[in-house]
Image (cartoon, coloured by chain):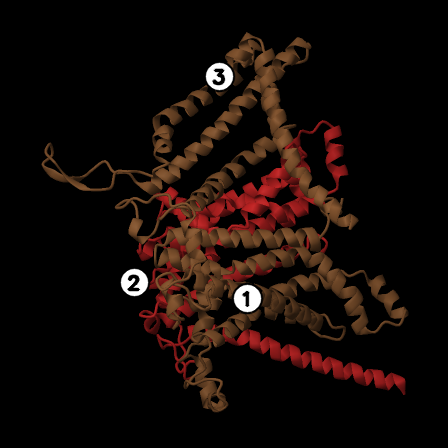
Amino acid sequence: MADMTQIAEKKANPVGLFFKAIGNYFKKFGTAVANGDASVKLSLIVCGAGYWRRKQIIRGILVTFLEIGVIAYTALIGVGYISKLPSLGTVQQEVVYNPDTMKNELNDYDNSLLILLFGSISLVMIIVALIAWMSNEITVYNLQKDAEAGKHINTFRDDLHDLLNKKFHITLLFFPILGIIVFNIFPLIVMIAVAFTNYDRKHMPPAFLFHWVGLKNFKSLFSNSLTMTFGYSFGKILAWTLLWAVLATATTYIGGIILSLLINFKYTRFKKMWRTLFVITIAIPQFVTLLMMRNFYADTGIVNTFLQKIGFVGFLKNIGLISTNYIPFLTSPGWAKFSIVMINIWVGVPYLMLITTGVLLNIPADLKESAMIDGANKFQIFQHITMPYMLFITGPYLVTQFTGNINNFNVIYLLTNNFYTTTDQKLAASSGQEVDLLVTWLFRLTSDKYNYKMASVIGICVFVICTVFTLLAFNFLIKGDREETFR
Amino acid sequence: MTKTKSTNRHIKETVAVHTILTILAVIWLIPIAWLVVTAFSAYDGMDTSRFFPKVWSLKQFGRVLFRSDNVVQFPRWFLNTLIIAIFTMLISTMFVLMTAYAMSCMRFKGRKVLMNIGVMLQLFPGFLSMIAIYFILKSVNLTNSHLGMILVYSGSSALGYLIAKGFFDTIPDSLREAAYLEGASEARVFFQIVLPLSKPIIVYTVISSFLAPWTDFIFAKIILNSGLSKDWTVAIGLYNMLERSLLPEYFTRFCAGGILVGIPIGILFIIMQKFYVEGITGGAVKG
């Protein structure tokens, strides 16, 4: 019970702290504006003013240029896009006759996607600029206080020096974080926004406009009717995704442990050779091995030919497991799911073997020896020493492995795309398949059907599932931060 | 008496373990073996009636390497991928090491917040944002270009800093503190103390970021959508060869091409695997 309340307190604190920090920030800004001298007050309009007053000429110029740049961008480009954000554009593309050139030309149309893209980017930039503007005011005021207290005021050279010293993290992180913002955060914002629009095949820019539709797409994900089968598909595909993630993670983990126990068995000869044999299979790029696998197990593939020859196919047919003259390894729902899990074992076990081998070899020997002296048998040692140690070390990896499997695009897509055809009309109507994971379904929706709105909704669902799972796992299964354990 | 009994048991166990390992190894290697022998077949399509080719030949390798047509332009793909991979490797390695050092060795305001945001961002399925990235790149005319692909692979690569951070975490504080006392700047500590001690993780980061463009095909498929074979990377090129209509004519060439990329990548992977294990087990395991 005590534990629970502690956890609850921990949970409540960050939110409180967050709002407190925001409050403090505004308070600081207020004091700076109220108590600042003329130059500090002028910095509200000309951002460099406060620095010039303290003889930080270059810094002041740089800050002012940045300010001018941001204002110019906002006025010339930003405002135009942002003002169209609420409607996402009103002028549809049309061909009009231009009397001046005497040709048919496209009118000055709105492109909803570009409006969404640059509108949201501009909006984020303006918010960031506002925060920067407030921070600038606080910095300038701090400079004033330092000057009044007679402290050393940094010259430009000092500032540069700081960037390689105390503030080296700013230098280090500037480009990496810029990259993440442009190639990860902006795209995510846009795609999340798409989930609230009707962006699909019938509303494709530049020829057509799309609009905000609120929560309609989320409703259709859970609804089920004659024309709308997303609810049906979502239930089926979600169930298989979760089942797959559990199966794929568990089978490869257990398989990996068994294989590495076999290889590291006391009397096994040529340990290194065995390890290399299995590593070869993962050294070849996955798209090569998986594409080959699907031809290996094709309906008319080599495995089927072989099994027909030895009469195994006939046997399965006699006992009623199949109704065809071949084994539909990757073409009937049940068999395909089974084969995918099996092929995934083939793909995944060598990785786990590598990892568990490393862990096994590092179990402190004295632990095992003292257990042996106490009369524990092999199985007891495995149960009480090897497994707990293994789980402790590989716990975080298992969690990422599970979410990785929820998002395991490659295995499913390479094994089944253009190869597996669903016979379930309701699934097909929403372009899903029995073997699809949420992510492959998402991809199929965009690449085959241009149904971006539903793809975004599914993407958000995947995120929610992964987040909930990760938070639960890290809070309840794996406790503590091991950051400084090895120092 | 008891001694012979236990020796007997050991022999039995040893034989059993070796038998199981042999069976498993065969299961694991048969598909690979099929890929290799098929590449040496004179027949163009997929021969399902036999495991080993009817007529052995090196002709498929020759065709893949020297005779390009509008479907297969292997040398061109290889060059494309190599250029993309080299620049991706340079940028990603820099980003990853810089981020890892800042997060591991420095203490500043907002560090934990940034780390948490990083974890959260990785929970979104990657190609959801890919669609938007495609339109961003298209608006600046960078789709179907090397630069676009390099940006896609290395742009947000800093998110993969955790393994390198785990390594930096194991470098003793005392080493850096001694340097600070002698007046070394943070930048100097990074370049002259931490980096020289981090060869394994640098090798790991270099190789893994170099391999990314060779093994990824989904991002490449979205960005390089011109449909022109000359723009492709090895991965999409090979994937395309197995289109249903092309398979009868190109299957053995696919196998040959697969081996040609598989060998260099495999060698790099085997070099990298030791660090891979160390990274995942959080430095708790020293190869």
User: What residue type is disc 3 on?
Assistant: Ile
Residue B102 visible in rendering: no
Side (left or right) of A15 relative to A4: left
- The alpha-carbon separation of the residues under discs 2 and 3 comes to 58 Å
Q: A323 or A179: nearer the eye? A: A323
Q: Relative to A233, does residue A190 appear above or below in the rendering?
A: above
**Residue placed under numbered mark 2 in the picture:** B69
Disc 2 on helix, strand or loop? loop
**Residue placed under numbered mark 3 in the picture:** A61
Q: Relative to A392, does residue A119 appear above or below in the rendering?
A: above
**Residue placed under numbered mark 1 in the picture:** A244
Percent coordinates x, y for residue A312 in the rendering: 49, 89
Q: Colour of chain B?
A: red
Determine the residue positioned at 72% across, 51% down.
Answer: A479
Reading the chain from its start, which is encountered first: label 1 or label 3? Answer: 3
The residue most toward the front is: A225
Percent coordinates x, y for residue B239 in the rendering: 40, 63
Residue A365 visible in rendering: yes
Q: Colour of chain A?
A: brown
Determine the residue positioned at 41% across, 64% down.
Answer: A432
Percent coordinates x, y for residue B264 in the rendering: 50, 60
